[in-house]
Image (cartoon, rainbow, N blue to C red):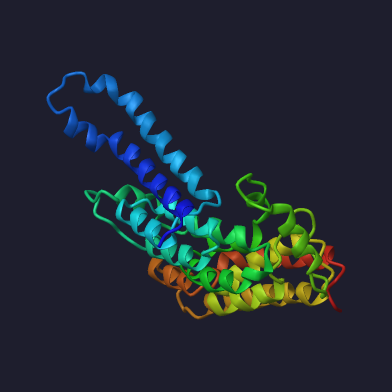
Amino acid sequence: EMSLPALVDTALVKVFLEIDNNSSPHHRRHHHHHHHHDLDNDGPNLMEEEESSKALLAFLKQETECDLDLTEEILTKKGKYKELVAFFKSREEHEKALILLKKLARSRKNNNDTSSRGHRMMQGPDATIEYLQSLVPDREYQDIVIKYAEWVVKDYPQKGLLIFTQQRQHQQQPEMRNDSNIRKKATNNQGGGGEQPSNSSSNYIPARLVLKLLKSWCGPDIVVTYLESYLKNTSNKNSALHNELVFLYLDLIRRAKEGKGSSNNKKRSTNDDNKRRRKNVPSAEHIQVLRTKLIRFLRESRMCSK
């Protein structure tokens, strides 16, 4: 029932995988077990393996006619997760890609597993962050970005912020398709509220929405880090956001003072310090830094309400 173009493109995936398999170290060790010139062949063969993997990845990033289900099955069996994510992305199957990325990010595979290399490359939040950054400029994907940003920000707060603060860098990569159209579309759709991005930021999820999300996901220190970055990198004219940062500074100073005063001992144990950090409460030594930041911001910002 598969169309001819789908049959051809899906068969091509199998060909690429066969070439990749034939040039793999495991295949070479098995095939040349009794030969003494293995070491001489290792260099060229490793290059062959890398080139065949690159060729498959480049092929799947294009708009192909590959059968979705069959290609997914083939790539999964071979542990080609990076290639599978690229394939899902080219088909705009973003939900499938992000579910897979989350699963891989949290997995711990046995090193002897044939797919462990692919798993290790995809462990941690980086691949998910990069994927979400590429979706942020298009408002159509706002709900998906929010849904899958949550686990990243909760598990990796500082890194997770990059989803909302560093799209520009990712957009300039050549593999981002229809980049100028996405930017035009998002700029034309940009709403009011003084949250228009400057040249150094291409984040089209409204800052007030990001703030609301961050407050529900993590502590005030992360919210402050986001707002500092946002106000620094945009020509924002929304006084509510400037006021918000002032109140957050004051809140952090208050929390730090309470944390300091809650102990009768002047010297706090390492355990107590760790507990305080886990609760996202700044340690006492940060009070002066926070005060300095607050005073500087009040002096520099012309948007704070008196």
How far across and how far down the image is residue 169, in percent?
A: 65, 49
Q: Which of the two residues, 62 or 247, is positioned nearer the viewer here? A: 62
Q: Is residue 143 visible?
A: yes
The answer to whether residue 218 is above or below residue 75 is below
For residue 238, side relative to residue 135 (left or right): right
The answer to whether residue 19 is above or below residue 183 is above
Q: Residue at point 39% right, 56% down? A: 71
The answer to whether residue 18 is above or below residue 209 is above
For residue 22, side relative to residue 179 (left or right): left
Q: Residue at point 77% right, 66% down? A: 295
For residue 178, side relative to residue 130 (left or right): right
How far across and how far down the image is residue 221, in percent?
A: 59, 69
Q: Which of the two residues, 160 or 256, is positioned nearer the viewer here? A: 160
How far across and how far down the image is residue 192, in percent?
A: 83, 74
Q: Residue at point 73% right, 68% down? A: 294
Q: Is residue 201 visible?
A: no
Count every numbered label the image shows and give the total.
Answer: 0
Q: Which of the two residues, 89 or 152, is positioned nearer the viewer here? A: 89
Q: Residue at point 67% right, 64% down? A: 138
Q: Which of the two residues, 271 or 222, is positioned nearer the viewer here? A: 222
- Give the quarter of the figure containing the C terminus: bottom right
- Give the quarter of the figure containing the N terminus: bottom left
How far across and how far down the image is residue 131, in percent?
A: 54, 58
